[in-house]
Each structure stands twice: as C-alpha cells, then as structure tokens.
C-alpha cells in the first residue's frame, strides 16, 4: 500500500496545475463551511466574555416566571436568609432617547434602555460607548420616552458597560426613580444575591426552598443558560452561510469528478501496466482515491485558513453597518475544523469514486487498447422519465438535465456553421458529450439557482407592492423611521393618532408572543409570534370575509383565521381554538370569530386584542411594525397634525402607500443582493471547472494540436478554436440554467400563491443577461488554456 501511496503522490506532483484547480474548488467551498461555524463561534465567544463578566461576583440569581412575579418586598426576606450578604433588584425598561437637540438617538439592533442596579452609581448616567458615538455628555438634558410617558433628565456622568455592543445605549437611573417613574414600584424583574461564607449552590437551594415558585440559579448557571440561548439565536447565521458553502461544494463535485475522469482516461496505459505487473483492482482504485483524499486534505486545511479571513470580513461589514460587535478574535471550536475537513475529504473522495472504480475495473489487455465510449441510451431514457416527472415537481428538472444533456449536446454540436474553426470546436465537444455536459452542468446549477432566486424575488416584490397598493385603504402608513428598526411604532403614537381631528380609523399591525393551536406565523428568536386584530381590519383593508365578522375583535376573546389555517385546524366560526403564551400561565380556549380568504394583508391567523392583552399584559413585549391610518379629511392641515406627532416622537415617519410599498420592495431587493453574492461562489467554481476541463483537454490532445499546427493551422486559429469550445460550453450551461431556474422559480411562486405571493414576474432582462453572461464566462475561462494551446509546437 505504501508503494501505491507513493505512486499517487508522484502523480499529483507531476500534474500540479490540474490538482490546483481541484484544490481551489475545495478551498472555496470549505472556506464558507468553516466560516459558518467560525462566525458563530466568534460571536458566541465575544458575547460569552460579556455575559460571564456581567455575572461576575453574583452568586445567586432569582427571576420570576409566567406564574410568579418577583416583588421588592422579597428583598427583606432574602437578606434574612443565612449566608446572604447582599440582595439587589435589577430592572431594565426599553426607551426612546432624544438628545439635547430633540433628535432621536440611534441604537442599532441592541436597543436603548434605562437600567437600575447595584453595580452603577445611583444617578443619571450614560454608557461611555454611546456617549462617544452620539456626542452626548454629562450636563446635557435629554428626553427619555418610556412606555408610560416621557421625562426630561440631566445626565450626571458616564459609566463603562461590559455589554455595550450592537449600538446598545444604556441610561442608568437612581433606584428610587426606577420604582417611582418607570415601573409600578411593586415588582422587579431580577434579584441578584451575593453570598457570604457559603457555596453558591447551597445558597441557591436555600433560596429555592424559601421561594419555590421563583426561578433560582447560581450565577454560573444563569450565565451558562444565557450563553446557550444566545447560541440558539445566532444559529440562523450558521445555517445561512453553511447552506451556500454546501451549494458551492456540490458544484465542486462536478469539477472534481470531471477532472478525475479525464485523469483516469489519460493514465489508462499507466493503470494497465500496474495491473499487468500484479496490481489488484482494489489497489488501483485506492491509488486514485488516495489522490482525491490528498486534494481534500490540502483544500480543506487551506479552506479553514480562508474561513478565518471570511469571518473577519463579515465581522467588519457587520460593524460598518452599525452592529457594534465586540472584537474577541476569531473563535475556533471543534466544529469549525472537523466539519470542513470531513466535508472536503468526503466530497473529493465521493466525486472521484466513480472514476477510481472505472480505473480498477480495467483488465490489463483491455486497457492497452482504446475503448469506445459507453452508449447513452439508458442514461438518456432515465433523464427523459425524470424530465416528464418534473412537470409535477420542477426541481427534478436539475437531475433530468444532468442525465439528458450528453445526448442533447451530441446532437447540438453536430450542427453546421462557423467554418473550419467552428467545426473543429464542435467536433471535440461532441466527441465526449458526457464530459462536456458535466462541465456545463456546474454552470447550469449556479446560474439556475440565480435565475430561480430572481424570479421568486421579483415576484415576491411585485406581490408585496400589489398587496400594499390594492388591498390597503390607508391614506397614511406610520412606520419606524427605519424599517429595520427594532423599536417598532410606540403605542403612545397610536394613542395620539386617534386624537387627531380628521383621522377616521387606524389599524396597528402588531404581533405578540402567543401560540394559536401551538403555532405562530413568525418568531422573535425565542418565542413564536402571532398577529393581533387591534381593531376592525376591514376598515383599512380589502378582505374577502368568508364567515363571521370583525365587529368584536376589540372587545371579545377570540381568534381569526384564513381558510387555509381553518382547514388545517378543522374548525369553523364558533369552534374553539387553544391559545397560550410563555408570558402567562393561563391557557385560553377561545372561539373563532372570523374566517377570510388568503392573499390579503392579514396573515393566516391572529388573536383578538383582549386575548393579547390578557396573555401578554406588558406592552414592551408587543411589536408594532406599522400603523395604517385612514383619513376622512385628507387636507394638508390633517397631514400636518400627523407630522407634528412624527416630529414629537422622532422615531417614526409617515409614508404614502407608494412610499411604503417601495420601502418594502427595497428590503426584498437587499435580500436578493445577498443571495446573488453568495451564489456567485457557485458560479466561480463552475468557471474553474471549465478552465480545468479545457486545460486537461489540451494536455490530452497535445498530438492532435501539433498535427493541426503542422498542416497549417495558425496560432490565432488555434486560440479561436479553444475559445469557441469554452464559449459553447458556458453558453449552453448558462442558457439551460436560465430555462431550468426560471421554471423552478415559477413553480415556487405557484406553490406560494395561497401564501401571499400571487403575482408572477419573469424578469426577462435579468434572465437574458444571465444567458448571455455565458459568452463572457466562456471567454474568461478560455484565456489561459487557449493561450497555451496557441503555443503548441508543430514538432511535438
């Protein structure tokens, strides 16, 4: 075995360029796979440092539950427990902060909070990071807008905060003011305990015995749980980046498989000689697999290094966008190293398995002779069957295309035209249609995914615009000043809007953390969310009501469903549905009050206002993404009164329906740009595949090129021939990718028709550019191989 390992190593060293192409493909894929895990590990490591620092010196943490709220009166009882040195309440309240000029202070995704605890001065202070970023300094008078009203305060100092990340803004307030102004003065959210001469776990048990209904943990346990919760919330980033990395690796399989197929074909006589001197089939197969494993190991190791670079780039981009992430270096864990290695080696070995087995199956005498290519009849027949089946399930078309294109290319490249250069190029491509098809399919896959995303994204944008402009009867839409703001529209804004003369009706598009029959239509990262019927939506929306009414949604317990949700639950108007929330111990069985047709602005299910208020009594746990306003007097004076409210609160703005639709469409466009950027990785690997195939083809056809040169073919003609081959491969791959991707995108739109995406948009311009991009891709991919072919010496 050592001998065959040496042979494999020498073979790899003797063909460095072709091996480099395979390694580069593996590097591109595994760098994103490793980067996905490293990014999560890096962010987790950074926040873990903050979390554990925050709980430093805290031995026991007491929090309430949905069944039991902590009260300030508990402090005396806690301090009387043996081993308790200190017990302190900790409270935070979300706010909107206006600076001394009355302008809203931005806080990114981390929010703006007031906080009162024992670790900070008993005075008004702002965290130093926010002070430096906003220009606020001690002595400034700022305005705090909290859920119950507003207050002007004068800042006295600045304080360092361990967790001042993500643009976090914290205003420390005196304990007395927290209890008098910002909370009810009775309850507290958390109590932190410092032990004296007693282990933390023992004190935890004593506190738990005293207050069995409370949630009691040691400081370390609380930090561990918070860290684990953070990991779960950050996991979506891992999944997104990992998905695109795996797509890239999948595309890389075709490059690697093609490379090894050509290497096996080129080394047929070498394998024959090995078989003739006694090598077994298994040894020949193993030698090829050893080469592939070598590529996987080198590519994966290099990919992990590039993964670190990718993490730093993503981290920098996120901080440039205002995330304010802490820098704790690149996080490395077992998954960051082990998974890319396993994926890289597995992909290369699986990709090379078929060529390796083909090499092992050759008999010594057979291998000494040229063998005819295998017929394509069975492969084509299976492909046609799958193509017909793709009518019902279009994603099958990708597999069908892979199987059918060899036969298609054999016929396609037999057409006449293009002179002698075109004839030579087409003849070579049709000589080995399977190789040509596999090379083109890598590009088909990448372009197909881009085309599908384009059709689906443009259809989603058009559906959103159509829904907003045709189904909303609002004259004004009030939104957060930035549609990606985490603060939402404050309830105080809605209260003020109702008092404006000329406003006929408003509808707050709000959601709360409740479950309807155990499900939600969204999530806040921790809890499922469902919409709230805050008032009669038919006043501001075009809704096809099937049964029931919206008359009692503001006064009665109940739910509303669209016909799909009602069918899934097997209920009609009058039947009961169970509703519960992690914010309450109460479980409600409430009637269905209304059922409507899908496709409207309303989601598939929602609770009435009394249900939301009963299960989630604290309004800070509500989120209102927009408020729709209908005017009975659309005069300039009415709009000016509304604008006065916007100016007063600073964090909201009024938009027309067209402006609101454009803002929603822009969000979708930004998402598509991210998808396009990540899918570009697959296209790059496909280009490498074309380069590699052409390079190996030139080596394989060295004598043919020399003969063509000796009979008079000029260097420029040789260059044109190879370039034509490259362009034909790329153009065929991109064109088929556009067709298949467009069909898959259409299928997704049709599948989502009952879920709000009911407008099909075929972006013909984008699809045409994708197809024509094949010419540019082919030209670029041919630069080096064509130049090498043109330098062929007629005497070689």
Image (cartoon, rainbow, N blue to C red):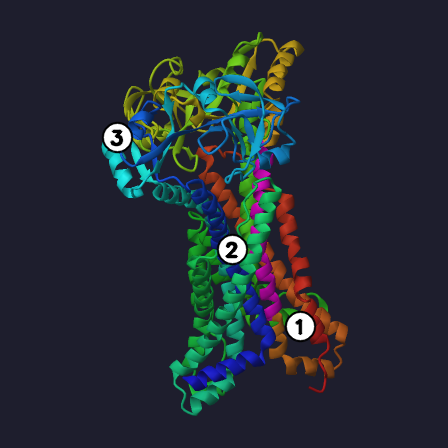
Report the Cα–Cα distance between label 1 and label 2.
Answer: 44 Å
Q: Which residues are magenta?
A: 664-693
N-term-proximal mark, 1 vs 3: 3
Residue density around tag 1, few if under 14, some if 14–19, many if 20 or more, within 10 Å: some
Taking depth in this image into account, of 346 and 66 the one nearest to the observer is 66
Element type at marker 1?
helix
Is residue 163 highlighted in magenta? Answer: no
Q: Is residue 756 above or below residue 240?
A: above
- Label 2: state its secondary structure: helix
Identify which residue, 146 or 692, lies in the foreground. Answer: 146
CA separation, marks 1 and 3? Answer: 87 Å
Residue 437, compared with residue 486, is above or below; it is: below
Residue at the spot of label 3: 211
In this view, which residue lies farthest toward the top? 501
> On the picture, is 596 further left or further right than 784?
left
Quadrant location of residue 711?
Answer: bottom right
User: What residue is disc 1 on?
Assistant: 424
Which residue is disc 2 drawn over? 35
Q: Position of residue 597 (x, y in %)?
A: 42, 25
First in sequence: mark 2 or mark 3?
A: 2
Side of 666 relative to 351 (left or right): right
* Label 3 CA crowd tier, 10 Å (few <14, some 14–19, many 20+): some
Spot occupied by residue 691 in the image (x, y as percentages of width and height): 62, 67
Give the main secondary structure, helix, strand or loop, of the magenta stretch.
Answer: helix
């Amino acid at each position: 075995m050592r001998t065959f390992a040496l042979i494999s190593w020498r073979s790899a060293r003797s063909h460095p360029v072709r091996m480099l192409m395979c390694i580069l493909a593996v590097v591109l894929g595994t760098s994103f796979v490793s980067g996905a895990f490293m990014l999560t590990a890096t962010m987790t490591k950074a926040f873990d440092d903050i979390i554990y620092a925050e709980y430093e010196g805290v031995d026991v943490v007491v929090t309430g539950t949905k069944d039991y709220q902590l009260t300030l009166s508990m402090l005396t009882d806690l301090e009387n427990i043996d081993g308790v040195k200190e017990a302190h309440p900790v409270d935070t309240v979300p706010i909107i902060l206006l600076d001394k000029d009355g302008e809203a202070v931005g806080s990114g995704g981390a929010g703006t909070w007031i906080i009162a605890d024992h670790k900070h001065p008993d005075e008004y202070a702002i965290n130093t990071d926010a002070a430096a970023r906003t220009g606020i300094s001690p002595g400034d008078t700022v305005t705090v807008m909290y859920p119950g009203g507003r207050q002007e305060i004068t800042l006295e100092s600045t304080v360092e905060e361990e967790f001042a990340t993500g643009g976090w803004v914290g205003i420390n307030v005196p304990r007395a003011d927290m209890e008098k102004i910002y909370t009810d003065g009775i309850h507290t959210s958390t109590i932190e305990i410092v032990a004296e001469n007693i282990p933390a776990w023992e004190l935890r048990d004593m506190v738990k015995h005293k207050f069995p209904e409370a949630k009691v943990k040691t400081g370390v346990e609380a930090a561990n749980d918070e860290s684990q919760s953070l990991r779960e919330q950050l996991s979506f980033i891992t999944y997104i980046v990992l998905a695109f990395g795996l797509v890239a690796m999948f595309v890389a399989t075709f490059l690697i498989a093609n490379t090894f197929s050509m290497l096996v074909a080129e080394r047929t006589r070498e394998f024959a000689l090995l078989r003739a001197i006694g090598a077994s089939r298994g040894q020949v197969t193993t030698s090829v697999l050893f080469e592939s494993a070598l590529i996987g190991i080198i590519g994966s190791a290099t990919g992990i290094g590039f993964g670190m670079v990718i993490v730093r780039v993503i981290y920098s981009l996120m901080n440039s966008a205002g995330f304010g992430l802490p820098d704790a270096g690149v996080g490395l864990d077992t998954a960051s190293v082990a998974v890319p290695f396993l994926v890289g080696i597995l992909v290369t070995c699986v990709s090379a398995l078929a060529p390796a087995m083909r090499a092992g199956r050759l008999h010594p005498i057979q291998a000494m002779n040229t063998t005819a290519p295998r017929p394509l009849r069975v492969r084509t027949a299976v492909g046609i069957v799958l193509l017909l089946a793709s009518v019902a399930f279009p994603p099958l078309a990708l597999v069908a295309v892979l199987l059918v294109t060899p036969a298609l290319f054999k016929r396609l490249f037999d057409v006449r035209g293009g002179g002698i250069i075109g004839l030579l190029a087409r003849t070579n491509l049709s000589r080995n249609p399977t190789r040509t098809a596999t090379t083109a399919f890598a590009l088909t896959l990448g372009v197909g995914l881009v085309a599908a995303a384009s059709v689906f994204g443009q259809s989603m944008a058009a559906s959103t615009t159509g829904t907003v402009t045709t189904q909303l009867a609002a004259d004004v839409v009030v939104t957060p000043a930035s549609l990606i703001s985490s603060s939402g529209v404050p309830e105080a804004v809605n209260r003020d809007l109702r008092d404006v003369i000329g406003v006929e009706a408003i509808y707050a598009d709000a959601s709360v953390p409740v479950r309807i029959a155990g499900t939600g239509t969204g999530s806040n990262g921790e809890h499922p969310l469902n919409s709230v019927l805050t008032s009669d939506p038919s006043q501001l929306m075009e809704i096809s009501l099937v049964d029931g009414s919206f008359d009692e949604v503001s006064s009665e317990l109940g739910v509303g469903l669209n016909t799909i949700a009602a069918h899934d639950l097997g209920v009609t108007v009058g039947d009961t549905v169970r509703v519960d929330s992690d914010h309450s111990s109460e479980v409600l069985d409430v009637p269905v009050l209304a059922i409507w047709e899908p496709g409207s602005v309303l989601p598939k299910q929602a609770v009435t206002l009394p249900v939301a208020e009963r299960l989630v009594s604290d309004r800070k746990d509500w989120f209102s993404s927009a408020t729709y306003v209908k005017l009975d007097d659309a005069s300039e004076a009415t709009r000016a009164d509304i604008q006065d409210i916007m100016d007063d609160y600073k964090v909201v703005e009024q938009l027309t329906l067209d402006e609101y639709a454009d803002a929603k469409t822009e969000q979708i466009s930004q998402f598509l740009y991210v998808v396009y950027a990540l899918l570009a990785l697959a296209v790059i690997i496909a280009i490498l595949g074309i380069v590699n195939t052409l390079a190996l083809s030139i080596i394989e056809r060295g004598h043919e090129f020399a003969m063509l040169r000796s009979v008079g073919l000029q260097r420029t003609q040789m260059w044109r021939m190879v370039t034509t081959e490259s362009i034909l491969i790329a153009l065929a791959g991109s064109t088929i990718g556009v067709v298949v991707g467009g069909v898959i995108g259409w299928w997704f739109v049709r599948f989502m028709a009952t879920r709000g995406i009911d407008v099909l948009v075929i972006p013909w311009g984008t699809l045409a550019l994708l197809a024509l991009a094949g010419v540019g891709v082919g030209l670029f991919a041919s630069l080096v191989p064509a130049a090498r072919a043109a330098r062929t010496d007629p005497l070689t």
